[in-house]
Amino acid sequence: MNISQVERGGGRIAYEVHGDGPLVVLSHGMGENRAAFRHLVPLLVDAGYRVATVDVRGHGASSAGWPTYAPAEVGADLLAVVRALGGGPATLLGSSSSGAAVVFAAADAPDLVGAIVQVGAFVAEPKLNPVVRLAVAAVLRSPRLFGMFHRSLFPCGRPADYAAYRKAMVANLREPGRMAAMRGVAAPVEPHWTTRVREVRQPVLVLMGAKDPDFPDPGAEARAARRLFATAEARMIEDSGHYPHADRPAETAAQIVALLKATAGA
């Protein structure tokens, strides 16, 4: 394991690079770490790409205690990684909460970003009743409860190594500052990523697990995201939950590689 770091105002961002070829940068969702993409990375490398997996600020091997976890800053972190790896244009993939970050990055630095992929991104803040709101608050303060919640996001089956991954993820969340980072990622912040979408001129791929339990209607959420962008396509990953790169990596890789090839030929 060869972990690199890039300095940012307030701390360090950790990332890991595999393969050679055009650059693809993968950014995980709240509470996870770069190992979330352990099944996707080798497929993209085999397809001829250099793949950087990033630990979002406050997560994994990145430093904790940041002044903000706003998606605009996470997007700037991803751009710092792209610059550290020689510049773009790179394709940025953001899972769940990081789906907002890649929009800011694409809008802020079109010279560094050739395309973006949103996986299970939230178009609007979820409307929670008081009971659910209390449950969410508890999850955001307990590594054990987050681990239980995380397991529920795989309604169609989990990877064979999921138990080991979840154990390591929960152990990381028990480190000082990690749960505060999760709460920072979850906190509503302005501007919302949807206010920047019309500035994104790069190709956009919206991916969504067809049975993602985070959404009442995953297909409708994917279509709503697609309609926001000037140039976007939406694809559903069948028999998949919130993390298609983990439960359906081959199908997810196929969609990403198709975008990469189309972008290269544009």
Image (cartoon, rainbow, N blue to C red):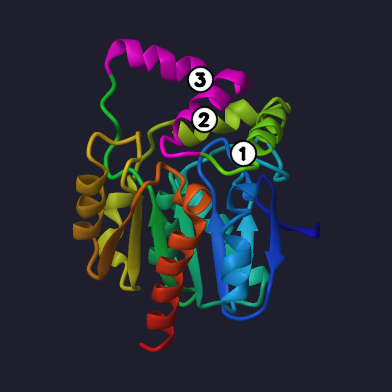
Extent of the magenta region: 129-157
Q: Quadrant of residue 261?
A: bottom left
Considering depth in this image, is 216 or 64 the residue closer to the camera?
216
Please say if the residues under marks 2 and 3 sit with CB atoms less than 8 Å apart: no
Considering depth in this image, is 48 or 139 the residue closer to the camera?
48
Please identify the quadrant where the N terminus is shown. bottom right
Query: How many other residues sit within 10 Å of disc 2, few (<14), some (14-19) or many (≥20)?
Result: some
Q: Residue 51's spot in the image, x, y percent?
A: 62, 67
Earlier sequence position, callout 2 versus callout 3? 3
Q: Which residue lies under the disc numbered 3?
A: 139
For the residues marked 2 and 1, what is the alpha-carbon distance in whole angstroms?
Answer: 9 Å
Front disc: 1 or 3: 1
Q: Residue 70's spot in the image, x, y percent?
A: 47, 42
For the residues marked 1 and 3, what is the alpha-carbon distance in whole angstroms?
Answer: 19 Å
Query: How many other residues sit within 10 Å of disc 3, few (<14), some (14-19) or many (≥20)?
Result: many
Earlier sequence position, callout 2 versus callout 1? 2
Q: Quadrant of residue 265?
A: bottom left
Q: Residue 129's spot in the image, x, y percent?
A: 27, 16
At 40% across and 50% down in the image, what residue appears? 100
Query: How many other residues sit within 10 Å of disc 1, few (<14), some (14-19) or many (≥20)?
Result: some
| Position of 167 relative to 234 (above/below) | above
Q: Which residue lies under the disc numbered 2?
A: 151
Residue furthest bottom in the image: 265
The disc at residue 162 is: 1
